[in-house]
Amino acid sequence: MNGTFLVVRHLQQNVKAFETWFARCGTKQLSGGSGYLAIEEGSSRVRAFGALVPLAGDTRAAPPKAAAGPGIPSIFPFNWPAFLPQIDLIASPAFAAVAKHWLRAKWFGRWRDGTSLVRHQHQPGSTMRPRSPPDNDFTFAEDPTGFACPLGAHTRRANPRDTRFPGSDEELATTNRHRVLRVGRTYGETDPNNCRTLDPNDDDKGLLFMCLNGNIERQFEFVQKTWLLNPNLHGLENEVDPITGPGTFDPAIGWRVKTFTIPTTTGPLVLKNIPDLVTVKGGGYFFLPSRAFLRFLAS
Ligand code: HEM
């Protein structure tokens, strides 16, 4: 066979489901000064929290600046753990914006600017001085416990590197056999009021995922089945990829929900009842003949 294989997936992203879940959670500070972040779901059904411990020697007081619209990064010059205890989480829209930004980063394993949580645990690289560009040259031996990048984060699942055996070159060589050449394109109607964003009132938006594989079974299908959708990957229990993974139907709630665990130094922060955020609308497998093969056919 002279060519390669293209996998395409039409993935609709349910942005409103995320916003609704986040609004229902309510973020609440439990204990003054100790830096607890609590996520509460509905009444007291879920009440999980983890401590975000101030960095040693960091006594900076972070004034709770108001987040200016989408300019969330403006509040990131502060270091997160130092910033957290300063504000009333419920009353502060600025905190809600930061919490959302932080949660998304934990789910993906990367900040919105593309920098890794492994190398930039507390704030996005683009807000640091000197500025850090998006990075990829790390291994999880630098973060074996997942305090920086959770064990179930999308990128840690999609490419676990050496998570199983930190520091092992053999493990890196093994996981590298499953890598894909990947590109994504967002789709959706443009916001009539802002040509740089998508229309918030149009629900049909998401990602056209494409990747090239020499062997679909060993690459795309393996990544999806064995890593992204594996409920017990990395010692987790009943968790799937927070982005693409389907939840389990909960009759008490009426929709499919899933759980995501964020390890912290004083215990796991467990987020529950997360709704499905992505719906597969279609896709296909295609053969891309090589130029040599096309020349052969044409001759
Ligand atoms: C709507 C669905 C998805 C969204 C929003 C999404 C988003 C992201 C983001 C933001 C990143 C990090 C930045 C980057 O490297 O591009 C990423 C990385 C990645 N994603 Fe996804 N993704 C989705 C679906 C998928 C699917 C279906 C797969 C494969 C089955 C996949 C595999 C990967 C891989 C392999 C990486 C690179 C991990 C690394 O090497 O660090 N993604 N994705």
Image: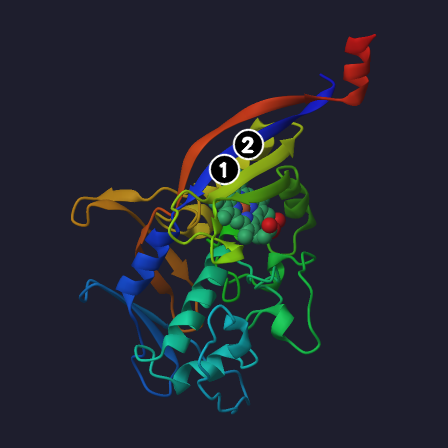
The response on whether ligand 1 sits within 8 Å of label 1 is yes
- Taking the spot 61% from the left edge, 74% from the top edge, the residue there is 127
184 sits to left or right of 10: right
Quarter where residue 76 is shown: bottom right
Residue 274 location in percent, x, y?
Answer: 32, 53
Which numbered disc, 2 or 1, marks the residue that appears first in the sequence?
2
Quarter where residue 298 is shown: top right
Secondary structure of the residue carrying numbered label 2: strand
Q: Badge 2 is on which residue?
A: 8
**Cβ–Cβ under 8 Å for marks 2 and 1:** no
- Tell me if residue 158 can be seen: no
- Numbered circle sitting on residue 3: none
Using the image, determine if residue 54 lies above or below residue 193: below
- Taking the spot 62% from the left edge, 66% from the top edge, the residue there is 119
Q: Which amino acid does label 1 sit on?
A: Gln
Q: Badge 1 is on which residue?
A: 224
Please tell me which residue lies in front, 149 or 66: 66
Please tell me which residue lies in front, 171 or 227: 227
